[in-house]
């Protein structure tokens, strides 16, 4: 395993360990399990099909150091943005598509830039991983993007119902995942 691969493996592992530890302090809420399970099953089936047709075979690792450096910068910046968003939202954070019992609308910090900065940060980190290691990772990023976009759409319906005056204004003034674009 090359040093670049180790850096990414350790970086992702540290991020997800932090994520699990931080989840202990979140507020209670309800998850629409049937909806969440359906989208996860679809993604798992897609991954299985891609594995069976050989989508991940024959794609060598990137060998250019400058490309790996660009990927590493995107990776670190994306994870830092996601962690900043997680720290800023505090106990209001929850797993995708969770309805909180005592919700608060957070629209400051990274939430001033995009409505779903955690998803944005993880996707940017995924793109950085693909650039640095192998373009095959873009398949994973694409599937995560579909899941995050779906989750964000469901979450926004909940937030609109919970904050009928504030959320539509926030939604009009702030993009969903990419500042100034989407």
Image (cartoon, rainbow, N blue to C red):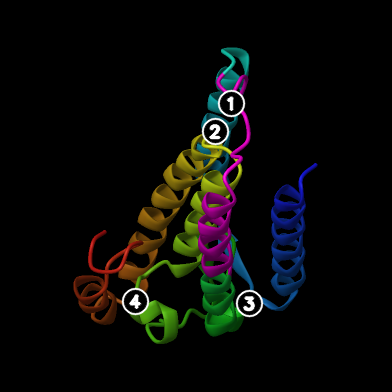
- Element under disc 2: loop
Give the label on residue 113, or none: 4
Where residue 67 sits: x, y (%)? Answer: 52, 50
Q: Earlier in the sequence, mark 4 or mark 2?
A: 4
Q: Earlier in the sequence, mark 1 or mark 4?
A: 1
Which residues are the magenta region? Answer: 55-79
Looking at the rendering, in which quadrant would you find the N terminus?
top right
- The residue under the point 51% across, 61% down is 74
Q: Earlier in the sequence, mark 3 or mark 2?
A: 3
Where residue 60 sits: x, y (%)? Answer: 62, 29
For label 2, the residue is 136
Q: Is residue 134 left or right of residue 25?
A: left
- Element under disc 3: loop
Give the label on residue 27, or none: 3
Which is in the foreground here, disc 3 or disc 1?
Answer: 1
Where residue 112 sits: x, y (%)? Answer: 35, 81
Residue closer to the observer: 101 or 168: 168
Looking at the rendering, in which quadrant would you find the C terminus?
bottom left
Q: Earlier in the sequence, mark 3 or mark 1?
A: 3
Q: Please tell me whether the stretch drawn in magenta is mainly helix, strand or loop.
A: helix
For label 1, the residue is 59
Residue closer to the observer: 131 or 24: 131
Quadrant in which residue 171 is drawn: bottom left
């Amino acid at each position: 395993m090359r040093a670049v691969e180790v850096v990414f493996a350790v970086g992702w592992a540290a991020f997800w360990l932090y994520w699990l530890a931080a989840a202990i302090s979140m507020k209670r809420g309800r998850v629409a399990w049937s909806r969440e399970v359906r989208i996860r099953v679809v993604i798992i089936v897609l991954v299985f099909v891609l594995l069976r047709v050989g989508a991940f075979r024959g794609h060598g690792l990137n060998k250019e150091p400058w490309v790996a450096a660009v990927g590493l910068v995107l990776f670190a910046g994306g994870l830092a943005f996601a962690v900043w968003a997680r720290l800023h939202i505090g106990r209001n954070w929850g797993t995708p598509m969770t309805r909180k019992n005592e919700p608060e609308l957070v629209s400051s910090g990274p939430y001033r830039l995009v409505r779903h900065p955690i998803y944005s940060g993880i996707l940017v980190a995924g793109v950085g991983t693909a650039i640095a290691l192998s373009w095959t990772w873009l398949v994973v990023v694409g599937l995560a993007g579909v899941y995050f976009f779906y989750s964000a759409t469901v979450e926004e319906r909940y937030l609109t119902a919970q904050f009928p005056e504030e959320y539509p204004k926030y939604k009009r003034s702030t993009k969903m995942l990419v500042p100034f674009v989407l």
